Image (cartoon, coloured by chain):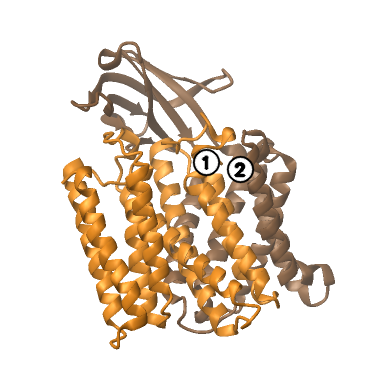
Chain colours: A orange, B brown
Amino acid sequence: MSWSLFLWFAAVAALFWTVAAVLAFTSRKPVLPAYVSLGGSAVFFAFIIGMWVLLKRPPMRTLGETRLWYSFFLSVTGAVIYLRYRYKWVLPFSSMMAVMFVCINLFKPEIHTKALMPALQSPWFVPHVIVYMFAYAVLGVVTLLALYLWAKNSKEPAGEKDLNICDNLVRIGWGFLTLGMVMGALWAKQAWGDYWTWDPKETWAAVTWLGYMFYLHSRPRIKNPVLSFVILTLCFLMLQMCWYGVNYLPSAQGSSLHVY
Amino acid sequence: MATGISYPWSVVLALLYVYLLVMIYVLSDRCSVCKWLSGRTSCLISIGAAFLGSLMLGLVGGDAIPDSLWFTLILLFLSTTIGLNAIRDIHHFRSARKGAALAHLGIFLILIVGIFGKGDKQVAYLMAQKDVTTATAVTSDGTRVTLPFMLTLKDFVMEEYEMSHTPKKYMSTVHLSDGKRGMRTVEIEVNHPARVGSWRLYQYKYDLSRGEDSPVSVFECVRDPWYCLAAPALWIILLSGAVVLFTAGSKKKRV
């Protein structure tokens, strides 16, 4: 297994995901598209496992490597949400997003086979990153849902049922963000002697976390659903800053322990 | 601001603060300010303020903001609204809201530790020379601190990856002795600190110019007595995250 094989695995997975997206609208069997999509995810996961074996460490160190997990979890989340709520548009959206992140990896790899430095050699490393990538994927899907509901809001105002689905996805995303953040804190205490130092990455993680917390607490008060969609979109922008934006932020240069 | 308060006043103030919150909660039927503080509006304002405060810190960066008065006051406001909700959750416990209740309690505790316990944390750096026994460390502002134990560096090992020559492992073997337990040999490496009494020792630096043959090893010595409250608070928040994500969608509920 090596990065040179990535194109092939990614192409097969993308084919599965695209077929699933088409099947969502054409198939008579409602479960079939989800299984086809999960088949694509399985092919993609095989590549991740292969890289794990090759690198002799989990492929989670570089941005390019975290994008692998993001594509994988996006496709899985899309399929699971389709199975649970039967929203036809979810599969095309999640497939498109997953393929987009695959393309970013192909065109702008930022892939270094750097070995794992001592601070990352911890049992917290794998769960911390996986849980965060899962949170990002779920929150990515809920942002797409919000944008979709927002776009059709003038013709068909979003109902309580649609908003409840948003809320539940945000709860799941927030739960995963919380797990990731606390695992990071417990790990930081082991590695650096302090569980919270307002390091730029930590600060942006807190901004994102507080944003989604605000969304959840504001829902009983907000009558106009558009405002909720605005908050959700804004929170997702904060999340982008936390994920990779800090790497380019002038105020974070040299001071963040998280700049890779 | 809060950095100025240290034991025993930090504990006294924290206890008084919790007592004040219980009073506010009890009086919330009779006093309009108390009612407002435990209501939805103050909850949203406090989360919004903390959001904007951290956003500003994220954009500007630096160490000044987390220590500033306004930032501490925002956190104090947030801990007040969350604390009042935590008290209500405990007073009127409902199983359907256990995720939110755990989150409120955990975040409230960690904020208390952050606001009142900051001044009690001690950090000092101990530079150990091979086979020299020492108990003196230096803080970041140059003050010398005498530690309640003796440390002797016996060996320092640095390993590199063969291909990339990037560091793989730093490890110091030391002899530690304190009054209670006598002498023992401990290995300290990144992610594996040693514990002596209330102190934790972290592998921090070595002589970069000498690399593998470095005759010195620097340890960051941390004493954080409030961590005994922070650790359970973190585990409660971790649990709350798990509960919230597993119970999402099970029933219609209010956050």
Return the residue nearer the eye: B58 or B191.
B58
| B104 to B57, vertically: above or below | below
Q: Percent position (x, y) of residue B217?
A: 35, 19
What residue is pinned by disc 2? B58
Q: How many marks?
A: 2
- Circle 2: element type: helix
Which residue shows up at 70% across the image and 78% down it?
A223
Closer to us: A248 or B17: A248
Eye-nearest disc, 2 or 1: 1
- Disc 1 is placed on an element classified as helix
Crowd band around label 2 with a 10 angstrom C-alpha radius: few (<14), some (14–19), many (20+)? many
Answer whether residue B108 is visible to the viewer in this image.
Answer: no
Task: Where is residue B179? Give x, y as percent.
Answer: 37, 29
Q: Quadrant of residue B192?
A: top left
Where's residue A71, x and y in %? Answer: 35, 58
Q: Quadrant of the C terminus of chain A?
A: top left
Q: Amino acid at mark 1?
A: Val
Tell me the tag on residue A246.
Answer: 1
Tell me where residue B16 sits by quadrant: bottom right
Question: On screen, B230 above or below A152?
Answer: above
From the viewer's side, name the closer residue of A248 and B53.
A248
Contact between marks 2 and 1 (CB within 8 A): the answer is yes
Distance (Cα) linking label 2 and label 1:
9 Å
